[in-house]
Amino acid sequence: MKQLYLVLCTTFLLLCSFSINAQTDFPSVKAFSKSILKAEDQIGEAATGDLNGDGLKDWAGVVHRRPKDSSPTYQLYVLLRRPQGGFHLAEKSIEEENPGMGCCWVEDLQIRSSSIYIQNNAKDVGTMEAVTHQFKLHKGEWRLVGLRIYHTDHSPGAPGTLDTEMNFLTGLVIEKRQKGARKPVTKSRRKKFATYLLKDFDFSGGFGNEPVP
């Protein structure tokens, strides 16, 4: 009888744990936050707006975690507002360590044009780079559909900027290069892009900008 009692207790605890881990619906953003934040964790950048064309305000936010024995991490969450009320966890990125040492940190997060725009910055002694990833629900998948890389070189011998915009759906790449006070030079080309999903997003400037295998 005692063994049966222990088995039932263990099963109950496992089921409770599974229920918590598998929870995808929340009555509010506050309830969602309460369910995932621990100790010194916090929600940093957050934005609201319609992501799926139903006229309701959805939510996206970056959770900053500070584990005791490892580097701080970032993780992007997407919640869709349900017509009957509350929110549904639609997607989340991987939880990735913040590498530090000038690279990379989340600077901004916006929802507009049914898309999530998340900007990460990086810098060193002579250069600074602002990278904006655009994610959108496209054909049932949360995909990377756009990428903008604004690179500034402050080197005394060759100051200048390179502004590159990539459309992952059309393959169009537009590059605007400027040296010092000279007139900007704009070029466009086509490129074949692989498919990148929000669930694999690692907050690096290179995400989506790797060569196609």
Image: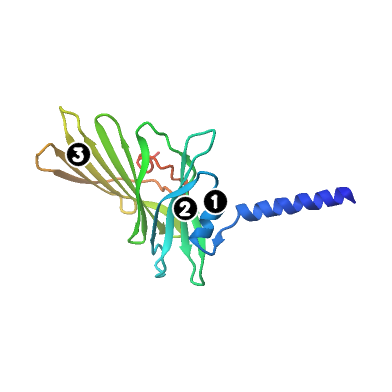
The picture places residue 69, in percent across and down from the top left corner, at 54, 33
Q: Examine the rendering and report whether any part of residue 60 can be seen.
A: yes
The picture places residue 135, in percent across and down from the top left corner, at 38, 53
* Lower sequence index among marks 3 and 1: 1
Q: Most extreme residue toward the front, as rendered?
A: 39
In the displayed structure image, the side of residue 182 where residue 38 appears, left or right:
right
Label 1: state its secondary structure: helix
Residue at left offset 51%, top offset 33%: 70
In the displayed structure image, the side of residue 22 where residue 94 appears, left or right:
left
Q: Is residue 16 above or below residue 186?
A: below
Q: Amino acid at mark 1?
A: Ile
Label 2: state its secondary structure: strand
Are there few (<14), some (14-19), or many (20+) residues within 10 Å of tag 3?
A: many
Q: Nearer the viewer, residue 81 or 209?
A: 81
The picture places residue 129, in percent across and down from the top left corner, at 28, 39
Residue at left offset 54%, top offset 62%: 26
Residue topped by disc 1:
36
Question: Is the residue under label 2 in contact with that under label 3 (CB below 8 Å)?
Answer: no
Residue topped by disc 3:
161
CA gap between label 3 and label 1 equals 40 Å
Label 3: state its secondary structure: strand
Labels 1, 2: front one:
1
Residue topped by disc 2:
77
Q: Nearer the viewer, residue 80 or 138?
A: 80
Are there few (<14), some (14-19), or many (20+) residues within 10 Å of tag 2?
A: some
Q: Quadrant of residue 160?
A: top left
Q: Examine the rendering and report whether any part of residue 211 can be seen.
A: no
Q: Amino acid at mark 3?
A: Thr
Residue at left offset 39%, top offset 70%: 55
* Lower sequence index among marks 3 and 2: 2
Question: Is the residue under label 2 in contact with that under label 1 (CB below 8 Å)?
Answer: yes
